[in-house]
Amino acid sequence: MQAPAFGVALSENPFVTRSPHYRAGRRTPRVRPLLAGPSPRATSPELFISVPSTFPRLGVAEPLLHALAVQRFETPTPIQVGAIPALLDGRDLLGIAQTGTGKTAAFGLPLLQRLATENVRPAPFATRALILAPTRELALQIDASLRRLATNLQLRSVTILGGVSRFRQVQAMRRGADIVVGTPGRVCDLLATAELRLGAVSHFVLDEADRMLDLGFIRDIRRIVAALPARRQSALFSATMPKEVAGLAESLLRDPIRVSIAPVAATTPKIEQQVHFVARDQKRPLLMALLGDPAMQRVIVFTRTKRGADRVAEGLEQAGQTVSAIHGNKSQPQREKALDRFRSGRARVLVATDIAARGIDVTGISHVINYDMPVEPESYVHRIGRTARAGASGVAISLCEPGEHGALRAIERCTGAPIAVAGSTQSGPTAAVLKPAGNSRRPRRRNGARRVA
Ligand code: AMP
């Protein structure tokens, strides 16, 4: 994004075109309340999105429509249908949705449109909008998505992340920014030295709030929020809504519109889910056998620990696979290089831990393999959401050893659906290693894997 253009009179500004309901003098979005309630302005009304919509009908203005067309975003996703009109109308938003639902454009389009409309010059070290994400990868991805959407606008964005040179970030902030996308730790660092000033922020987005709390960022978030002006527009997104997140939302948002998109596992029939019961020492041969399937074009393998990720990656490399690994002990340039290799297809397999993989947005991931079962059921939903993105289909395969049966049961409780047991037939290339470990008490299904609706 470029430096902002100045001196555009409001009437000449393409963004004076407001959303249709704004023009009609209505301040509430057109979407209907899901629950019979007194009025859509009652506290946090939940919205039911059923009508297929278009971006112009949501109120998105021309320069952004052009960028959407270039990216072939033809139909808005449900979170976009729910969020865009509300945010364009200046409402706060509580979005219960995870990565993969199109939520970046859901908050990004109105944000860019409003910033371009307001057309204010940021002071040195100040920013007009702040977007917080729990990981560097997600922050970089948000920044990249916004840049793609803003190609026809003159807005300046700066990323403020840990793990990379602070100096460059401070240099970039000298000119001020329209948008800062950052992770809480580094944002707090720069805030403390006044190399980032938040007094002029008019738009605030907190992404993946549940993950932020899991990662222990609550104190940083509170410090950051305390530095924001009280008069601002805020949006909070979270995949899940435990009471800590609900409390945070309550303290951050003012009379928010609430848009809830059911979790991927419950809504994506396109993800075929399977579990293999396997002894621990058989996981590696099983993984190798599975990778023998040419349908596995682009695969993420999840491990629980960083050391585990390194070990699996080394083993695969020795077996002749093209592999990248990404986890918390890798430096930011190493992570970006690993992601680049995977994205470009130079590495067929990406081995990752949960936190490092959070928010990875790589299209065309055909398979997700849980080499270790995730400890938290929500992580399972996030992991499998790496595949079947933007309308594609995908397969999620879990390798479950005897000690992980409890984790499997917790996942099934969370998603509300049993995961099909694979390998109950003895045919196929993997039969030798597909035998379930002795103490599996799960019933075997005759037809092996099936799609889970
Ligand atoms: P997000 O949830 O923002 O990470 O988006 C997930 C993926 O969906 C990204 O690859 C986006 O580029 C893509 N995407 C977002 N909105 C749309 C849309 N309306 N049509 C098609 N793809 C989209």
Image: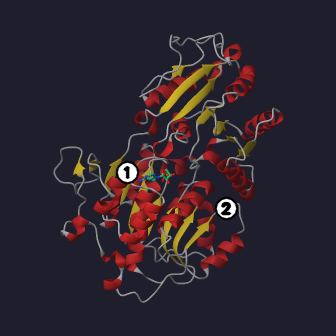
For disc 1, the neighbor class at 10 Å (few under 14, some 14 to 19, many from 20) is many
Residue 394's disc is none
Q: Nearer the viewer, residue 181 or 20?
A: 20
Foreground tag (1 vs 2):
1
Is 389 situated left or right of 17 in this image?
right
Q: Is disc 1 placed on a helix, strand or loop?
A: helix
Q: Residue furthest bottom?
A: 7
Q: Residue at x 48, y 22 (%)?
A: 450
Q: Residue 153 at what x, y percent from top left?
A: 47, 75
Q: Residue 382 at what x, y percent from top left?
A: 53, 41
Residue type (three-letter) at the residue carrying disc 2:
Gly
The residue beneath circle 1 is 79
Residues at marks 1 and 2 touching, judged by CB atoms closer than 8 Å: no
Q: Nearer the viewer, residue 218 or 308?
A: 308
Of callouts 1 and 2, which one flags the residue occurring earlier in the amino acid sequence? 1
Residue 219's image quarter?
bottom right
Q: Is disc 2 placed on a helix, strand or loop?
A: loop
Q: Residue at x 34, y 60 (%)?
A: 55
Q: Residue 301 at what x, y percent from top left?
A: 66, 36
Residue 424's image quarter?
top right
Height in image: 439 above or below 37?
Answer: above
Height in image: 420 above or below 392?
Answer: above
Is 371 situated left or right of 275 in this image?
right
The residue beneath circle 2 is 162
Q: Residue at x 24, y 68 (%)?
A: 22
